[in-house]
Image (spheres, coloured by chain):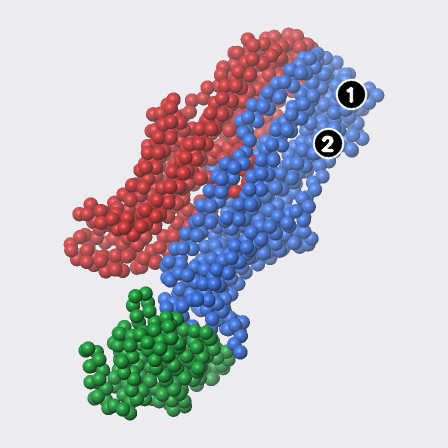
Amino acid sequence: MIRLIARRELTELWRDGRLAGAGGLVALLVCAALAVGWQRQHEIAAERTAAQVLDYDDWVSQQERHPHDAAHQGMHVFKPEPALAIVDPGIEPYVGSTIWLQAHRQSELKFRPAQDATGLQRFGSLSAAWVLQVLGPLLVIVLGFNSIAWEREQGTLRQVLSLGVAPRQLFWGKAVALGGAVTTLLVPCFVLAAAAVLYASSAAPVPALARLGWLAGAYALYFGIWVFVVLGVSARVRTSRASMTTLVALWIVTVVLAPRVIADLSRRWQPTPTRTEFEREMQHDLNEEYEHAWREQFGTSVRWGPDLPLDKWGISLRVDDHAGYGVTDEHFGALWDTFAAQRRFQEWAGLAVPILAVRSFSMGLSGTDFSHHRNFSVAAEQHRRVMQDLMSGDLIEHADPLKDRHFAYQADRELWRQVPRFVYDAPSVGWALRESWPGLLVLALTCALSAAAALAAVPRQRML
Amino acid sequence: MRRPLADARTIAVFETRVLLADRTLWFTALATLVLVLYGLLNGLAQTGERERTITGIVARQAETERGNRDLLRQVMARAVTPDPFANPVDPASMGGGMAARHAIMPTTALSPLAFGQADLNPDYYRVTYRSKATFMYDGEIENPWNLLTGHFDLAFVLTYLFPLLIFTLTYNMLSAEREQGTLRMLLSQPLSVLTLLAGKLLPRIGALLACAVAVPVVVVLALRPESRHGDQLALLMLWAATVASYGLFWCALAAVVNAISRSSAANALVLIASWVVFVLVVPVLLNLAVGAAAPSPSRTELATRTRTITVSALARYNDLLSSDYKFVADADILLPKDGRLQIPERMQGLYLVQRDTDVELERLLEQFDRQLDAQQALVDRFGLLSPAIVMHEAMASVAGNGARRFVHFRDQVGAFHRQWKAFFEPKVLQGLAVTEHDLDTLPQFAWTERPAADARAEIAGRLAALVLPTLLLAALAYARLRHFRPI
Amino acid sequence: MLDAVRVTKEFGPKRALDDVSLSVRGGDIYCLLGANGAGKTTLINLFLNFLEPTSGEVRINGRDVATAPLETKRDVAYIPEQVMLYGVMSGLENLRYFAALATGEQRTRTQLLDLLASVGLDTAAADRRVSTYSKGMRQKVGIAIALAKNARALLLDEPTSGLDPHAASEFSELLKRASASGVAVLTTTHDLFHATQTGTRVGIMKQGKLVEDLSNDDIAHADLQALYLRHMRA
């Protein structure tokens, strides 16, 4: 019965041109976005991989110099572009891609692409995720807004019900049809995405495809929410026109308006410091730690007096560094935890504003969210500390004894080679799921809730 | 003789009463007001925060300078032994960080009107003689997720939401009359449909513009005193004209749709679809096109080249860098004699490395600014395709938060940086001690605003880019309405 | 006053009016009879410039409606079958509005109340929202608007449909008064009785053609009914 209804619905959607027209448009946009995403990801990934190799080669083959200078010159590490950035580039335009690992300072990733772009960037980048999240619901609305209301207006609703079809069977038939229509449109896009992702992740295709699978599930839930909302409104409201008005208003509020308001709220609930505040407080805590460490180690906190000759330079570097690690970890950790808290706030707001939940999960599984970024930053920082410790270790051994001629000491290739190549393994799917599970949970809950609400609008017995 | 103006007035008055009686006007005006005020409030808050940050920086800089001066005096009086790496007499220490001065771009009176690029680009830099690479790349701290979402500022309200509010009042101007049957009653009178439409538009436009234009203007004039005269006032008026034009564009579109289409529902659909196309889709597609036509140079490459430049500089001055460092043991060396000071060769080496790096980097960085300029030029030209783009850019420009003003700032910072280096280079390379007189004559960053005429011309250009399509649509509406039939 | 000169109106392949000519002079009450779809309303719409004739001319007071739409509308008042007004406003406010648009004059409240009283709408009713009105009350407002206009011609579309006999006869009285003062009245109707009682001329339309155009003195009621039915059957 449900299958019959569904089939009839689908035929009608096809015949009146909506499926081909609106649906075709959306599918086209998704494919275009995928093409663009693929080209971008391909370019960036190649560039960064090459640069990373070159960088290490340069490091290793640098001439003899004082290890501290080498540490100041440092090395760059480049964040690898995940294969699924093809589907969802996430926050990439707003975070840097390069860290300069150098002595004395924990750097952040620099060079946000958005800073190199005009204000137009703020309207958004074309990506499959954007099309699906923003325009997808509109498509569902266009296809389904008058699904039940129209039948009521035409009078065919009475006819069908009088044949003995239960209202809820009718509802499920329409739901299947609507969902089926959307699925039909998006399956080719999914295939295209899979092919692109496969090509981009030729080294390790399975995790990438697994991520894509999870993404497909999340988007299915997202569309499911809208299918139920559309049908529920169509069932409850008197006329097609009112149904359209309500749904479009809902779309505008939840897709255009609410995300920004909720971002504001999350900022208010968990404020982030300004750069000057952050640096000042960190510096203050660092100075305290330094003083404490110096007193412990050297018995004085006066730097470079007669009490502290230059043969302690190397050791002092190490003391400073190690004293600083705790402080910087704490401050950056707190900052990043604030970001994470803001994200959670917005994810849970997804119960009312589903786009926030799907956006978070989509980015999380694509590897383009802040958790992945943080993971990379931390790994890079670890590598920097390795490099730094090796340098100061070498200084302590070879340069300190030279006292005043400290800076005449030059290390060579033997030392440079000791610093390992920076190898970064992208986090596993499991890790990504652990970081992003609330988004998926919220989507599932909202889907269930909207299904229940829609069914509540469709009585068991009569429907007029 | 019939006077269309008198008729339009009659209609306008009656329409106002109808709209008020059926609550549409109340709701829409209220919604507009709430949204406008919320957006404006956010803008005011953000501007306030920026200004507080700047005040704080200025205060702390003054404090640091006082501290430096005191320390200098003490060192000169041999009352205190300076830290060799933080010696107020040593130009290498001072120029390299101790005496660092901030280059600050002030907010304008109209900053609260749009966030623009202010959440991405810093409005202050701490300038030392070290390479630009060390201080120009930092951004302000903001959760990237929130950067992606965007802010709820007045520019957002006006660009995205204002058209929708206009639609709720104008989508059925003629179609509702037809559907409820009053159109026949009206058009059986000696009344042209053009006059009718004009009369109906008047109260709608009036109410919406009052909320969207008059309210922010009043708030800004009240809370931002510098907006009351001179260039800022002129810009404010241009802003008002721009918003009005944008609103009129969507009204004109509604007029065309009413002139052509048959049913209110169809009208609403067409208008929403236009909004989706012009405000959501076209900007995203244009962003793509602009990025493809004038792509930014590769930052990865910049990073690589920065390093190779640094490496070659390090190699060039290796001898200086590896020289002896006697200074820690012999405290006397840290004090000036006859105005001269022994600058550690290593410090000189470090200075030269930074200087040479900078010269090379300058060329590379210029490419980025030029490319950004090229992108901006494309946006200016093709932004015409979507009034939303034009509007958004105009808002950012007026608020002093557009891309161009930030580039202007960075240019000035570059010039200040060169000034700073010119001040310190002879001292570092020739071993001249820093005196109190030097502290009095340290280069000071003097912000010069872009020529007001430039800003005005830019916005006037955008205004024209809004007015033109509006006029075209109005002409189209006029042409269709002349053959309008109420059947 | 009201002249249709060899008017044809086609909607694609369908010919709604086929070479129709009729004339209504001042003082005449011309009743146009015909089945649904015969073209009566189309003719009215042509007089109001709601449609353009495919060929022929429609004139009001000697002026071609197509070339002088606004001037011709000054000379004609229109009462549709369903008088639709702005439900959220009162009868008085509606009258004020339409009257102002009709003549360009602003009338005082007293004048408007008098006008409404003359068509049988009392003050209390006049100040109520039109959404509370019955069809008859709305029609009264429509008549008041037409009276306020003081036009030389009157176009009526099925004026008595849905009215009870009392209201219908009141209406007829109004028409007679109007024609007595020299107004040319063209009214479409199904009501044969009303046609014979009130009309001075009668026309019968069938499938876009004017098949009969008679003066009412020429025939008696019984004959008119027979004539009408004969045309309908054929």
Up/down of C89 relative to A452, above or below: below
Q: Are there few (<14), some (14-19), or many (20+) residues within 10 Å of tag 2?
A: some
Identify the residue shown where x is 32% and y is 89%. C200
Q: Nearer the viewer, residue A263 or A189?
A: A189
Write the residue at 60% across / 12% down: A63
Q: CA distance from mark 2 to mark 1?
A: 18 Å
Residue B419, numbered label:
2
**Would you say the residues marked 2 and 1 are in contact, meaning their CB atoms lie under 8 Å apart?**
no
For mark 1, give the secondary structure. Answer: helix
The residue depicted at 38 percent of the width and 89 percent of the height is C27
Q: Indicate the chain coloured blue by its letter.
A: B
The residue at which mark 1 appears reads as B430
Q: Secondary structure at mark 2?
A: helix
Locate residue C49: give its quadrant.
bottom left
Q: Quadrant of residue A60?
A: top right
Percent position (x, y) of residue C68? 46, 75
Looking at the image, residue B425 sits to the left or right of residue A235; the answer is right
Percent position (x, y) of residue B298? 54, 29
Chain in red on the image: A
B17 and B249: which is toward the camera:
B249
Q: Colour of chain C?
A: green
Q: Is residue A379 visible?
A: no
Disc 2 or 1, which lies upstream in sequence? Answer: 2
Q: Which mark is residue A85?
A: none
Check disc 1 and give the amino acid type.
Gln
Q: Chain of mark 1?
A: B
Residue B99 in view here: yes
Q: Chain of mark 2?
A: B
